[in-house]
Image (cartoon, rainbow, N blue to C red):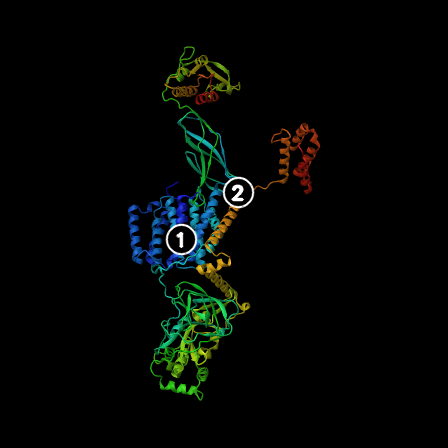
Amino acid sequence: MNGQPSPRLLWFMSGSIGLITLPHAWHMPPLLIGFFGLMWLWRLLAISRPAWLPNRLGLFALTLAGIGLAYSQHRGVFGRDAGTGLFVVALGLKLLEIHGKRDVYVIVYLAFLVAATQFLYEESILMALYILLVCTVLLATLVTQNSVSPQTVPALKTAATLIVQALPITAVLFVLFPRLEAPRWSWLDADNQAKSGLSDTLEPGSIAELSLSAELVFRVKFDGDLPPPGQRYWRGPVYTLFDGSAWKAAPALFRAANPDQPVFDGKAYDYTLMMEPQKQNWVFALELPSAFPAGLRRNELYQLTTNKNPGDRAEYRISSVPSYNTGGINPAERRESLQLPGKPSERIRSLIAQLRGAEASPEALIANLLQHFHRENFRYTLNPEPMPERQVETFLFERRAGFCSHYATAFVYLLRAAEIPARVVGGYQGGRFNTVGGFLEIRQADAHAWAEVWLDGKGWVRFDPTAAIAPERIEQGVNVDLQIASGAANFSPIQFDAKTLTWLQRSQQLWQNVDYQWQRWVINYDTDNQKALLQNLGIDDFVKLGYWLLLSVGGFSGLLAWRLLRPNRRRRDPVLQAYRQFCGKLRKAGVDFGPGDGPQTLAQRAKAVRPDLADTIERIVAVFIRLRYEPSAEAGDLRVLKTLIGSLRV
Amino acid sequence: MPTQRGLAFVLLIVLLLLVGFVYSNNLAYLLGFLLASIFFVAILHSFKSLAGLTVRAGRQPAVFAGQAGAFNFQIGNPGRHSRYAVHLALQSELAIGLAPAETRTATLYQTTARRGWLQPQTLTVSSLYPLGLFRAWAPLRFDNPLLVYPKPAKRQLPFPESGDGQVAQGLSRRQGDEFYGLRPYQRGDAIRQIHWKTFAKGQGVFSKQYAGAGSSELWLDYQQAPGHNSEERLSQLCRWIVDAEKAGLRYGLVLPNLRVPPDTGAAHYRQCLQALALF
């Protein structure tokens, strides 16, 4: 049965191979994907014209070219991109060389590997469904290969059946199969693509760019109530060093620890935070995190950092208390929080003097400053005119228009000039509530900067000068879609009322919820999750786990086996069954009859052999004839027939 | 029973799980688990691809030793599902597909070397369906022997002398004979002996009788057959029977333990050859 495969098989195979490689086109070097495309087209054309296939020498040359190409694009064979490239090139080359069954299998197996590499690039639910679809076609290729007279639809059906029947066992294996934490090998690390997000320098313009991005940063599911919108500050990097135009985050390492630990008081919020892949290892916890898992660390700036790869999606259980007192300040920190690039100008100093007024307390100054922003026609805009020089003064005295980082910068600058320790805090504010899934989605557009002032007896206290100008920014968040549409900031209240959501919004939320659950339970299922889940099930060691695995896989297989392999039961006629029993009894009694004899003939012979039973036999035959051939038969007749036959003693 | 491809499939699964492990990629794991489950499920499907098939041995025509013996089997698919690939192997192989409730006759060949009854070897019914990862098979033994006649001798020796001293010289001799008369047709008369003219006139079926053939009967005697051993003699006798039947002669067979009176026709022919085969 070897030899050239049938055209149908080739179509099947080429189709599935094309489908499997298609998504790679988005991230593979164009030369490699082009090479593959060429091979694929060649194969496609050669289905009807086998003579067009390259000979041995041509194939060899092509192989060399392919290897050279793969190597030149990636300088090696290891790592995600290089490995994928190699697989795809190999797949393309193998397509041109199909001599028998074996080659078909090699190609299909290679295709499965290429399908798996696809997941290293994208893990969305849609991609998973797509790959599942392609796998069906790949399996159908094998089914076609193993059928005597292949047909397209039954082959696809068989493949789909196989997959559907395999799914329960797959799920069991997925949940129970022990996940081991793989060591991280640097050469395997995916080259992190440019990801937007907060960085450790804050230029006033940078947040404006983020404000136009709908990219998801993290999602939060609260165990109980949500904190009110005004408290949804997700703490990120703390910026302490100002050079006149940009802020730099102070390195958290090697800092002297604060003399006091923060004291929490009031309601704590427990939540699950799922970070999307990031550049930095920052975890944006609600201010201020009080309890967090072991892999996280709260640095001296009260920011959470993780020791995991920030490029991986990760989930954390965190508790935060919005009401806190961080206590004292150490001298180094105080010095750092008063740092200014050069001496403040005369105008600034007179503004401070004016704001300070009769009272000298920092609280009064802050209140006056916020009043000043509110009163003096300061505006909130996402596209202010650039302020290249003397930024703070230009903003305070001329433009009076900016967004959160401008206000936070000016606010902190003024306080520092007034000898009050202050700093800028970056992070996210707000978030959009998904009513379907019951979680908050925080996007890049929610990026925010606010200020923190150290007050005696209160510790570091948050002030958000933007709230003084545009309280709706804090209360309602940013409407990203509208901003992108108009290119400017535009606030519209975001409805939390499910009834007023349009069906479009609802389906969007539904989809986001599906995606969230997918990320939580499938993509993000790891050693920790597994341990927690298994402990809930009462599995605490490998022996028990083994039993569970065996039991559930065996159970499902057994169920399936029963469904698949039970004999094709024919519907039995109970009347005929009873009659057969009757015949059996007569045979035992020595009545001789053939298979063609009707009931009346049978009765005649039986009566001749066993006159003693003649009465019963006659009645049985009469009931049988009525049941079988007359429409007047009643349900009770069957019971009579059975009793009569049962009473027949031979 | 996993095939080589099945084992390669296991390797593929291991590779996928390895990718999942190294990159901590749950979807690669998932794909690996899916293929592993398909591997399990495929076992059941392989079994199902054969389960319920009915195989019955059919009747088979006798052959001469050295010819390929053809065994007929009736393969039936009583179920409601199509069987896309059923592989049958005796000495020859055959792959068939069966529609639901279809029964087909499959003819498989086996070489014959010796005369006598030949039992079919074990018939292996197998299937690689659906994925070729597993081979389900069932060895079936049938008590359904095929009769093998001796191999006719190559040399065309003249017929032995008959008891009345005449030597039957086969075809040439018979053609030289004169037409002697008609007698009512008897079962076993050769078709070419039928006198078609009388039949066409509606006077009944008559057989032509020739002077030579009518009077002389050919006796094929084991003792008179040349050969160094019994097999060679039987082989020669077989040759004579074949030739005599072709020539339409009346011939009888004498074996040490059996005596078949002279006659002609298919049944007689078979009877003689069977006697040789089972001698």
The amino acid sitting under disc 2 is Arg
Residue A286 lies, with reference to residue B103, above or below; the image says below
Residue in front for this viewpoint, A374 or A304: A304
Q: Nearer the viewer, mark 2 or mark 1?
A: 1
Q: Badge 2 sits on which subunit?
A: B
Residue at figure coordinates x 49%, y 31% from the top left: B58
- Residue A124 in percent (x, y) is at 44, 60
Q: Are marks 2 and 1 in contact (CB under 8 Å)?
A: no
Residue A568 lies, with reference to residue A492, above or below; the image says above
Residue in front for this viewpoint, A350 or B97: A350
- Residue A399 in percent (x, y) is at 39, 81
Disc 2 marks which residue?
A: B80
- Residue B171 in percent (x, y) is at 40, 18
Question: Left or right: B89 with respect to A97?
Answer: right
Q: Residues within 10 Å of mark 2 (few under 14, many from 20)?
A: few
Residue at figure coordinates x 48%, y 13% from the top left: B181
The amino acid sitting under disc 1 is Leu
Disc 1 marks which residue?
A: B16
Residue in front for this viewpoint, B139 or A324: A324
- Residue A221 in percent (x, y) is at 49, 66
Which corner quadrant of the image does residue A21 belong to?
bottom left
Which corner quadrant of the image does residue B166 belong to?
top left
Q: Badge 1 sits on which subunit?
A: B
Q: Quadrant of the C terminus of chain A?
A: top right
Q: Residues within 10 Å of mark 1 (few under 14, many from 20)?
A: many
Residue A615 lies, with reference to residue A43, above or below; the image says above
Which corner quadrant of the image does residue A423 belong to?
bottom left
Tell me, yes or no, if residue B212 can be seen here: yes
Numbered badge on residue A480: none
- Residue at disc 1, secondary structure: helix
Q: Quadrant of the N terminus of chain A?
A: top left
**Disc 2/disc 1 C-alpha distance (Å):** 37 Å
